[in-house]
Image: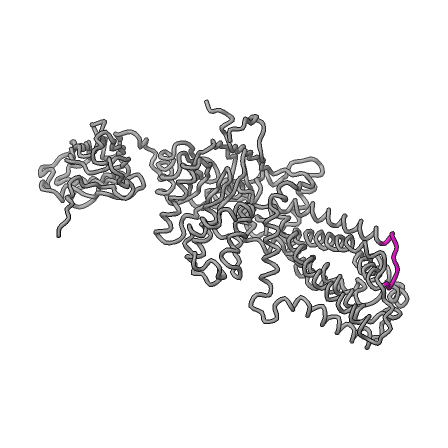
């Protein structure tokens, strides 16, 4: 049972209707019809006719529901990821949340100030200097002059544009403008922060800095964040809970890992260590419960085919929790290239990885099952597993886990003169 | 953040329904720095990379007055009143007209011009037209100063008999400026709201303002118009801007006459137009991004 006090934002029956086609033809007649119904105390006639918003199929109505009956709650300090395909209604939802446009029906109640970051650098004026723009942009985003003055040095420092700060922004490179803009946004301090895909800006170094800052905001400072992105790795590393939108409706809401698997079209319960396939791979699992660094990792794959196959090839791809591939091998790469020289229809393959060099964290395995000619079945994220930290002698000192997915325990260090 | 809040007690609600006038003054007050920064931006960026810079604030009304004096007074021989230099008469009219018309044109494209910002971030929308009115107020102040300088020049440094004298009613000048501001702002907000859906109005504004100037007694006294074209005089007479400009000239130059009825008429019309503009603006700001 959730304490109702803890809920900082509550959306009830949020719907948003849009009119398709050209605005202009028939606008006045529809407006008059609406007005005529309203003064007689009737409902808006065009509210009834909307269809669900499926981009690819042609509908008969001019009106469409970009969002329909959206309900969700956000707890204080939670980072909620909103994911969905193009046109699922993510941006519309963000626009309503950030008060840029109103909902057609329903309401959102909040217990805190909402600041939105649908774009960085909103209101930047090319003729003004970087410093002047920090003040203007900050004020547009809802900061007071006092707040900005208190933070201006930090903002300039974070942007890395010290040298150009008193030069008009029109002389900046586009990257510098974006850095400056993001720096202002990063120092916003509302209770609720709404972010659209603004992280996809700047060079790699700055993106890393930006994601780091976002993590600080959500974890360290306990801010409530609503985050929309197509960058699954970023969503996964930032968010705790998620909502999957499809055709303007909530398709799924819950744990972020489940959301991501729902979104990627894989409805398997990825937290389980064994997977029951529908096709050729009947089952794939890791028998051992507790895996730690330098253990032997055993993976078992049970299969059954309709036809008999010779020279099976089983490939595995191990990925970390942001989807980065760490290992991509199959049995051909190793000393026993032939799993079988006889024809088989069913069996069980055991893959044993000795002295596992994966540092503590979550991983998933893709399976590629086939023969020398084709892949007969590919299962993405067939197994997920966790490497735990119980043998932590190697990780006593401060190693950056993000930068070292694969760790070598015996690298020798010595000074030679 | 550990303050005990009642579960029913929400800080903000986002909903489709709105009161007729839903002005959150507390919120606008919280955004006062933004208002100030917008005004600053308007002032400092307009004449960036120009040689004459802020001098343009003076040049425009001066040249217009010179032309008006040539055409309407020297050529068409419109009388400006006993002992009132036509140039000063025109400068007074243009200065006050300029404030109104810049407020009107400046605010009338609020939604269209700020689509980019409005579509991305929320702040009380009314801040934007307000900032236009305030930055124009500053320009009006500068132009008023020019007017005063020429006044002094005419009184002390020319041989002309200048009978024009500021009147006691001048203490009401701030009210008059307020009326002009409210009128321009209200009218502008009304137009900007309607243009989001019906673009036709943008065309109307640009030449409509020019036409309106001729109907607002800027370059002629109302009494002269009444004497010469009595059948259409009501058109000019009931135009609130005529009343305001006539009052402005009476206060500063002593031409025409002052009546409380006129003063109250201008005030009431301005406030009413302002309120109508505000209501429509409020209705529009929530959904304009879908129709613009």
Is residue B257 visible in the rendered image? The answer is yes
- Residue occupying image coordinates x 63% and y 39%: A45
The region drawn magenta spans B254-262
Q: Nearer the viewer, residue B123 or A167?
A: A167
Residue B260 shown in magenta? yes
Q: Quadrant of residue B234?
A: bottom right
Instruction: Please report the residue visible at 11 percent of the width from the left and 37 percent of the height from the top.
Output: A343
Q: Main secondary structure of the magenta part?
A: loop
Q: Nearer the viewer, residue A271 or A222?
A: A222
Residue A132: percent from left, percent from top: 53, 56
Quadrant position of residue B40: bottom right
Residue extending furthest top? Answer: A1
Left or right of A208: which side holds B105?
Answer: right
Q: Residue at x 13, y 50 (%)?
A: A416
Horizontal side of residue A51 vs B201, given as left or right: left
Query: Horizontal and vertical percent for residue B47?
Result: 60, 65
Q: Position of residue B282 (x, y in %)?
A: 65, 45
Q: Is residue A140 above or below residue A48?
A: below
B58 horizontally vs A220: left or right = right
């Amino acid at each position: 049972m959730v304490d109702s006090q803890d809920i900082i934002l509550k959306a009830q029956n949020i719907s948003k209707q849009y009119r398709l086609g050209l605005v202009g033809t028939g606008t006045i007649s529809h407006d008059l019809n609406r007005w005529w119904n309203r003064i007689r105390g009737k409902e808006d006639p065009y509210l009834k006719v909307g269809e669900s918003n499926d981009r690819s199929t042609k509908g008969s109505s001019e009106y469409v529901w970009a969002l329909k009956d959206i309900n969700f709650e956000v707890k204080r300090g939670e980072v909620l990821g909103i994911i969905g395909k193009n046109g699922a209604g993510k941006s519309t939802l963000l626009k309503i949340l950030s008060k840029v446009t109103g909902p057609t029906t329903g309401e959102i109640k909040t217990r805190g100030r909402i600041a939105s970051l649908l774009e960085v650098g909103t209101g930047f004026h090319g003729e003004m200097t970087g410093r002047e723009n920090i003040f203007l942009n900050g004020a547009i985003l809802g900061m007071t002059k006092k707040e900005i003055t208190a933070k201006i040095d930090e903002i300039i420092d974070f942007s890395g544009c010290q040298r150009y700060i008193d030069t008009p922004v029109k002389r900046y490179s586009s990257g510098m403008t974006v850095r400056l803009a993001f720096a202002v946004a990063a120092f916003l301090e509302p209770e609720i922060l709404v972010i659209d895909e603004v992280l996809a800006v700047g060079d790699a170094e700055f993106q890393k800095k930006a994601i780091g800052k976002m993590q600080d905001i959500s974890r360290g400072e306990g801010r409530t964040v609503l985050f929309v992105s197509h960058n699954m790795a970023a969503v996964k590393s930032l968010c705790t809970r998620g909502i999957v939108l499809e055709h303007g409706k909530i398709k799924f809401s819950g744990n972020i890992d489940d959301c991501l698997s729902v979104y990627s079209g894989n409805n398997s319960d990825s937290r389980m260590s064994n997977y029951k396939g529908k096709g050729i791979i009947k089952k794939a699992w890791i028998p051992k419960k507790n895996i730690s660094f330098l253990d032997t990792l055993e993976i078992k794959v049970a299969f059954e085919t309709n036809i008999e196959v010779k020279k099976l090839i089983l490939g595995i791809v191990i990925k970390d929790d942001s989807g980065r591939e760490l290992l991509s091998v199959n049995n051909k790469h190793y000393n026993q290239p032939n799993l079988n020289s006889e024809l088989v229809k069913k069996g069980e393959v055991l893959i044993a990885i000795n002295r596992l060099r994966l540092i503590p964290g979550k991983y998933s395995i893709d399976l590629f099952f086939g023969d020398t000619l084709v892949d007969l079945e590919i299962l993405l994220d067939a197994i997920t597993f966790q490497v735990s930290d119980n043998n932590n002698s190697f990780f006593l000192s401060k190693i950056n886990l993000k930068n070292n997915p694969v760790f070598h325990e015996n690298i020798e260090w010595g000074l030679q003169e | 953040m550990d303050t005990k809040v009642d579960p029913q007690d929400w800080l903000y609600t986002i909903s489709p329904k709105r009161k007729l006038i839903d002005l959150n003054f507390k919120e606008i007050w919280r955004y006062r720095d933004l208002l100030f920064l917008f005004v600053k931006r308007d002032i400092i960026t307009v004449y960036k990379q120009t040689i004459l810079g802020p001098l343009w604030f003076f040049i425009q009304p001066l040249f217009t007055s010179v032309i008006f004096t040539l055409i309407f007074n020297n050529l068409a021989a419109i009388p400006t009143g006993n002992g009132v230099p036509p140039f000063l008469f025109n400068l007074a009219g243009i200065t006050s007209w300029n404030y109104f018309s810049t407020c009107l044109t400046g605010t009338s494209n609020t939604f269209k011009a700020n689509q980019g910002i409005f579509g991305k971030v929320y702040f009380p929308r009314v801040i934007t037209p307000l900032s236009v009115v305030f930055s124009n107020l500053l320009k009006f102040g500068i132009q008023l100063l020019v007017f005063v300088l020429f006044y002094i020049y005419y009184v002390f440094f020319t041989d002309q008999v200048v009978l024009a004298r500021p009147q006691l009613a001048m203490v009401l000048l701030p009210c008059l400026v307020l009326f002009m501001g409210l009128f321009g702002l209200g009218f502008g907000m009304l137009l900007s709201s309607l243009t989001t859906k019906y673009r036709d109005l943008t065309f109307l504004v640009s030449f409509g303002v020019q036409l309106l100037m001729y109907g607002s007694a800027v370059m002629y006294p109302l009494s002269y118009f009444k004497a010469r074209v009595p059948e259409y005089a009501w058109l000019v007479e009931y135009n609130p801007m005529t009343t305001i400009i006539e009052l402005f000239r009476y206060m500063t130059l002593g031409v025409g006459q002052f009546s409380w009825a006129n003063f109250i008429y201008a005030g009431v019309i301005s406030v009413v137009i302002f309120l109508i503009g505000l209501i429509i603006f409020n209705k529009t700001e929530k959904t304009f991004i879908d129709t613009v």
